[in-house]
Amino acid sequence: MELVKINIYAAWIGILLGIIAGATQGMFFHNKDWLGGYTSWRRRMTRLGHISFFGLAFINLSFGFTVLYLDISRTILLPSRLFIVGAITMPLVCYLSAYKKFFRNIFFIPVLSVLSGALIFIFGGLF
């Protein structure tokens, strides 16, 4: 069970980073032309990066508390790692994509990490 505590710590770090990112971006939201305007690619990607800190934090928090509450010991190592990889790479890819559109091509990394983690966790104990 010590393993999932890492996911819980990762979740709280993600929440903290989400607050910091939101506060930083929030200092400029009043400028309608900031990062090319509200609907620009750069601004949309920074908003997605900001919210992904929270979204992936909640996934890690839910995973950690589910494992602890249900006292699950089967098939948790790989999902634990995959959820952390997703929590790191999703905001990173979002902010990198805001910088250079080319980086949108690596969105599959965080998406497949989280998707695989969920599938392995949900179905891992059935087989």
Image (cartoon, rainbow, N blue to C red):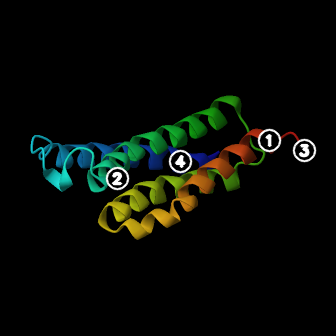
In the image, 71 versus 41, the foreground residue is 41
Q: Is residue 97 left or right of residue 20?
A: right
Alpha carbon separation for disc pair 4 and 3: 24 Å
Q: Which of marks 4 and 1 is nearer the N terminus?
A: 4
Q: Where is residue 60 in the image (x, y as percent from the top left)?
A: 53, 43
Asked whether the beta carbons under mark 1 and mark 2 sit within 8 Å of each other, the answer is no
42 to 66, vertically: above or below: below
Q: Which amino acid does label 4 sit on?
A: Asn
Q: Name the residue under label 1.
A: 123
Q: Where is residue 21 in the image (x, y as percent from the top left)?
A: 26, 49
Q: What element carries label 1?
A: helix
Q: Mark 2 points at which residue?
A: 45
Alpha carbon separation for disc pair 1 and 2: 32 Å
Task: Residue at 31% x, 46% y: name it.
Answer: 47
In the image, 40 versus 23, the foreground residue is 40
Mark sitting on residue 19: none
